[in-house]
Every structure is written in structure tokens, then in C-alpha cells.
Amino acid sequence: TTCRLPRLSTRYAVRPSAVTSHPLNSSSSGPALHSLLPRACPTPPRARPASQFMSLSLARSASALPLFSSAARSRVKALSSSASRHPSLAPRRHSSTTTVVVRAAAEMTSYDFDIFTIGGGSGGVRASRMSSQAGAKVGLVELPYNAVSSATQGGLGGTCVIRGCVPKKLLVYGASFEAEFRDAQGFGWDHGTEMPAFSWEKLLAAKSGEIERLNGIYKKLLTGAGVEVYEGSGRVVSPHEVEVTAVDGTKKVYSAKTILLAPGGRAWYPSIPGADLGITSDEALALPSQPKRVVVIGGGYIAVEFAGIYNGLGSKVDIVYRQALPLRGFDEEVRQTVANNLVGRGIAVHSGVNPVSITKNADGSLTLETDAGPLVCDCVMWATGRVPNTDRPDLGLKEVGVELDGKGAIVVDDYSQTTVDSIWAVGDVTNRVNLTPVALMEGMAFKDTVVLGKPTKPDYENIPSAVFCQPPVGTVGMTEDQAVGAGHTCDIYTASFTPMKISLAGRVEKAFMKLIVDVETDLVLGVHMVGPDSAEIIQGMGIALKCGATKARFDSCVGVHPSSAEEFVTMRTATRRVGPKAAAAAPAAATVAATA
């Protein structure tokens, strides 16, 4: 049937919501048209087959993403009634009005939910909660809570809240007091020759209490937004159906117009003899007692963070990695500064070394054999990377046609849509940029695209990030190598100094700051820092880069004094010029400085 509505700036979409008798269906029962969404609906990234939803005829678009509002239920009931009286009406278009043509197709079905989400981590919770608040009927399934993840254990909040960012940061805070207690003596605090006593058990109990509280808050946020939450595992059994296995083993299938996959990722370690004798970051945050000797294998951000945690809490720490420097992918000077700080903090660094095997000794200790010799310890921690969580438990993706890449990540387009049109994915399971705030951004883009009808691509340019080693790293934008590799000729500004915070402590540890500036445009392409409060400082730098800040704008900003942050707006002399046109003209200030 055809409905004439006043011209609006938005387009309209229709969804089915109940199976009732309908004269346009050749069978005895079929879908009733029950809701009309007065929101803009995008032309989808790929054309949907007509069997997926009701066809639309619009003045400017022949297809749209249908989602979901009850605002015009009565209007669509009228359409259904009209269709029953005039089943042979042909579609009509009118130049002065927006024409919505609703065809009831025999193959259409109704759904229990508009959106059903598998995974209650950062991306899944954000997408589900915001979609529900925007008018969609949303269901979500997540495994029952446990501090250590498995095929049957997980919890609302996901890796970040339960066994990642949040508990790790709490332990980083705890570990940082060790250096501050020592530094305090230089500022007149005399606490004798002994450090305050530390209790691992007390810290872990406090951490666990806070994580359990946050886990409960996540459930309240979801239910408060109207999301129906199920505890158990989810498996995709068709493009519009999810089978939920409850904790007691009972199974039930729920249908949904759109399925969202957000099961996150999990720790990975190589298959060497005795590898299972080691632990991952999951267990490292939940050990019942503190190991006295720890070997951390890996050179990424998880590795250097946990090396700093255990070292600060009093364990003897060795860190083993294959590269010459830690933090592969970060700026080279940042990497070198972090390596120096690891050694300066008393951590034994074994660079260019590979693990060979782990064996358990008679006294309960472990021996890690490497290609450079053995290391004896009480605990070996794997920090060798993470993999997408598409097979623990099995999500049934291959059976329904969802494409996975060579690492098991879900392949998605620019809008987070998979190779099955009704199935979308966000977060670490897609292996794009595996950071919690990125998963949140992807979840919001999903809501905008699918629910509000505003096609929105996640924006991965100039994402600020931090590494909570000690002292921490903050970075946003291009590294020097990336900028040169992209064809930019850049002036590089660097500064290295002793932070005022430790100036009286007698401890040697340098802060490092760096700006990468495109010579042709004066745009600041990258900002990097190692030092106290770098994570807090780099957030503001991220805003500046998103706004397209130039070096001239940085220079025009009045610094906050005395602070480390002011160094970013007071660096006037370029350290060097790099890139394809670097030899053509050296930076004038650098030439003068060199002459002087």
C-alpha cells in the first residue's frame, strides 16, 4: 500500500514486530506492519536482500536500514488496514511529498529483538545501552562473572573492567608508591631505614571488591536502559538467530533483526614445551599470593606494565623480549627511553631473547629456558599478545557465512558490518585498534548507523593512547618513522629533562617529550611523551591534533608553569629535520644552534 506523508528531511523505514493474520500473505498468517521509525535511515554500506526486511520506496533512495520506534504505530496499523481493503493498490510517487511504500512480503518474519548482542564488554555494553535508549529493543548475553576468563566464564564489563585496564591501573597505583616513598626522603620525610610493609593479599582483596562493584554497575546500566540481559553463552545459528545457553545448560533461541558481535579478545602465548606452566594477565591480576621472582615474556605494553607492577611491589623481575627494544610500533625514541627506565628501576632486561621451554622444579620453582640461557623464577607471565575471541566458546560464525581473517578476527567494512548483512561486530574481535575507548567509539558509530540511520564510520585518526609503565607513556598521532614513510618532511622537536617531582630525590630518571611537525603545512603530526602524568597530558594533545593544530598554534599558547606540560608549547629549536626533502633546507633554528 502507499502512504502520503508531509515532506520531511528524514527518510522512514519499517520493521515487522508480530506475526498475525495478513491478507497480503498467501499463507494463513504473516507479518503485520507494526512500527514506523521517523528517523533518517542511511543507504546501507551494501545492498540488503529483500528477504531481510520490508522494501521501501523513497523519493531519493530505494533501500534503507529499517529500525525501530513506536512513535507511529497507529499510522502503520492504518496502513495494514488499508492494505487489507485494497491489496492490489500499486505504488505511487508524488513530487511534493515523501512517498513511503510498504510491501508485506511472504518471506518476512517477526523478531524477538531489534538488536541482540553477544558480549558484554566495553563495546557491546555501550552499543546496546545507547541503542536501547535510542528506541531499539535490545537483548545481550554475557558469560557469568569470574576474574579469570574461560570458555564458560567472563562477566559484564569484559576484559577492561574485570581483567584489564581498570584492575591493572589500580595495581599500577599501588606499585608507584614504592618509588614515591623513597623519593619522599629527599623532600624531608624521614621514615627510617625500612619501607612501609606491603600486603599483596590486602591489595588484591580491595581490587576484587572494586571490580565486583563495577561489574554490578554495568548490569544496572544495561537494565536501567531497558536492555534485556541474559547470563550464559551465545551462538549464532542463523543470520537472525542467537542460541543462548544458560548457566544451567538450558538452551533457547532468540531472533533479532540485527546481531551485534562483541566478544572481545583473550591472551595468547606460543606453543612451547611447558607453556601451560606460565600465566597470562588474567591470572596475574588474581594470584592468591605474590611471587617473589617473576619473569615476564613479551615487549608490548602489557609486558612493560606488569614488569613495573611486580617490580614496584617488591618482586625480583626479569623481562624477556625478542626485539632490541620494547613497545614495537611506538616511536623509536620513546622505546629507547622506556628501555632505559626499565633498567633504571632495577628490572633485568633480556632483549633479543626467545623462550624455548618451561619446566617445573622439585621445589616448585620454574626454569625458563631461553636461547640465551636459563632463568629460574617462581612465576612466568606470558605477555605475548592477544587474539580475537571467536572460538572460545564457538560463536558459530563460519556456519552462517561470517568471514574471519587469518588471525580469527571478524572481517568488517568501514561501518562495522560483517559479510552477513544482518550481523555487525565491534571491539577487539575485529582486530582493528584494540583499545577500550576505540570499542566505545565503534559502539556509538554502530548505534548512529543502525538505529538512528546516520551512516557513521569510526574515526581511527589521531587516537591518543597511554602505556602505564613507570613512568608512563603518552602518545598521539604519527611516529617519526610513520611520518617519513608517509612522505612528510618533518622538523623534530625533542626535550629530555629531570622532572621537578624527583629533582630533590636523588634519583636519575629522565622525562622525554617530542613533537613531529610537517614542514610544508606546519601541522603537528605527532606528540609523544614519557614521564609523570603523561597519560593525563596526552589527552589534551589529542584534542589539539583532532582540531588540526599547527606548531604556530602550539607556540602561541601560554604554558602552565611550572609543569612538564609547558614544554610542549615552549620548544622553539628543532632537533633535526627528516624526510625526503630534509637535505634541501635544514631548519634555520637548528643551523644557528649548531653554529653556536
Image (tube, grey):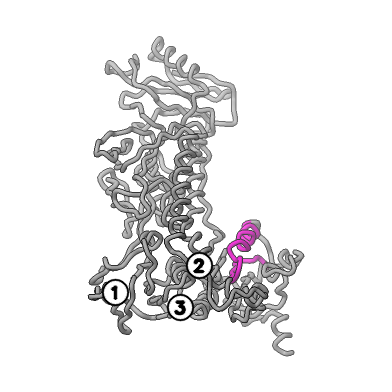
Query: How much space separates mark 2 and mark 3, taking CA atoms?
Result: 14 Å
- Are there few (<14), some (14-19), or many (20+) residues within 10 Å of tag 2? many
In the foreground, 38 or 504? 504
Callout 3–callout 1 Cβ contact below 8 Å: no
Query: How much space separates mark 1 and mark 2, taking CA atoms?
Result: 24 Å
Q: Which mark is residue 365?
A: 1
Question: Which quadrant would residue 86 be assigned to in this image?
Answer: top left
Q: Amino acid at mark 3?
A: Ile
The residue at which mark 3 appears reads as 347
- Are there few (<14), some (14-19), or many (20+) residues within 10 Å of tag 1? some
Instruction: Point out the stretch of residues depicted in magenta.
Output: 522-546
Residue at horizontal 43 percent and vertical 64 percent from the top: 200
Q: Which mark is residue 175?
A: 2
Dot 3 falls on a residue whose secondary structure is: loop
The C terminus - image quarter:
bottom right
Q: Amino acid at mark 2?
A: Ala
Callout 2–callout 3 Cβ contact below 8 Å: no
Q: Relative to 475, is 76 above or below?
A: above
Q: Relative to 224, is 151 above or below?
A: below
| Mark sitting earlier along the chain (2/3) | 2
Residue at horizontal 72 percent and vertical 75 percent from the top: 572
Is residue 536 something one can see in this rendering?
yes
Question: Which quadrant would residue 382 be assigned to in this image?
Answer: bottom left
In the foreground, 81 or 470? 470
